[in-house]
Image: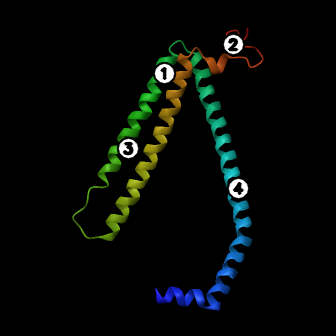
Amino acid sequence: MDQITDNLTSIEWWLSSIFLGVLLNVFSSFIKDFIDKTYRNASQRLSRRSEKERAKIIQIVKEAIEYPNGLSVLTYQANRYMLLAVLFGVISLSFTIPLFRDDLLIYISSFVLWLITMCICIIYLQKSHRYDLAVKVFIDNYSIVLKDPTESDSEYTE
């Protein structure tokens, strides 16, 4: 408590507080601009990535429409990628089993192998999700693929 009262009565503490406040105020505008710019760029990248993903799904559905058993092919692909993701997930779990040696190289290599298999698992999960969405679009009467944007919806117009 004595130290707090000593700090409040010392001129050095007050000058350093004022200096720090002014310094933070000056740099806060630069930091705010940097954060705003970073957020804007990230959201633009995310929207571009979403559009690319939507285009991939539409292309997959367009290719599946050409075949008489297109829905079963899409379902097969979705299940295939999901099973591969589960397989690599189980394989990655095997690298987390502790080894009974005190060798750092073994632990590092098992961590690297775990990381690689988890990345492969995530890639297959993304592919499975893409084909799941393609199946949904296919089942929903090709609503995204065959709809002409120039035509008006008859059910929404009066």
In the rendering, at what x and y percent does residue 6 appear? Answer: 54, 90
Q: Which secondary structure, mark 3?
A: helix
Q: Which residue is mark 2?
A: 156
**Occupied quadrant, residue 27:** bottom right
Marks 4 and 1: which is nearer the front? 4
Q: Are marks 4 and 1 in contact (CB under 8 Å)?
A: no
Q: Which residue is mark 3?
A: 88
Marks 3 and 4: which is nearer the front? 4
Q: In whole angstroms, how far apart are the C-alphas of marks 1 and 3?
A: 22 Å
| Label 2 or label 1, whichever comes before in sequence order | 1
Q: In whole angstroms, how far apart are the C-alphas of marks 2 and 1?
A: 33 Å
The coloring applied to the image is: rainbow
Tell me the crowding category of disc 2: few under 14, some 14 to 19, or many 20 or more residues within 10 angstroms, Cα based.
few
Q: In whole angstroms, how far apart are the C-alphas of marks 4 and 1?
A: 44 Å
Identify which residue, 20 or 107, lies in the foreground.
20
Q: Are marks 1 and 3 in contact (CB under 8 Å)?
A: no
Tell me the crowding category of disc 4: few under 14, some 14 to 19, or many 20 or more residues within 10 angstroms, Cα based.
few
Q: Which residue is mark 1?
A: 73
Instruction: Residue at 67% x, 10% y: name it.
Output: 155
| Label 1 or label 3, whichever comes before in sequence order | 1
Residue 12 vs 34, above or below: the answer is below
Tell me the crowding category of disc 3: few under 14, some 14 to 19, or many 20 or more residues within 10 angstroms, Cα based.
many
Q: Which residue is mark 4?
A: 36
Q: In whole angstroms, how far apart are the C-alphas of marks 4 and 2?
A: 39 Å
For residue 7, side relative to residue 81 (left or right)? right
Instruction: Residue at 42% x, 49% y: name it.
Output: 118
Residue found at the very far left of the displayed protein: 100
Q: Is the C terminus in the top left, top right, bottom left or bottom right quadrant?
A: top right
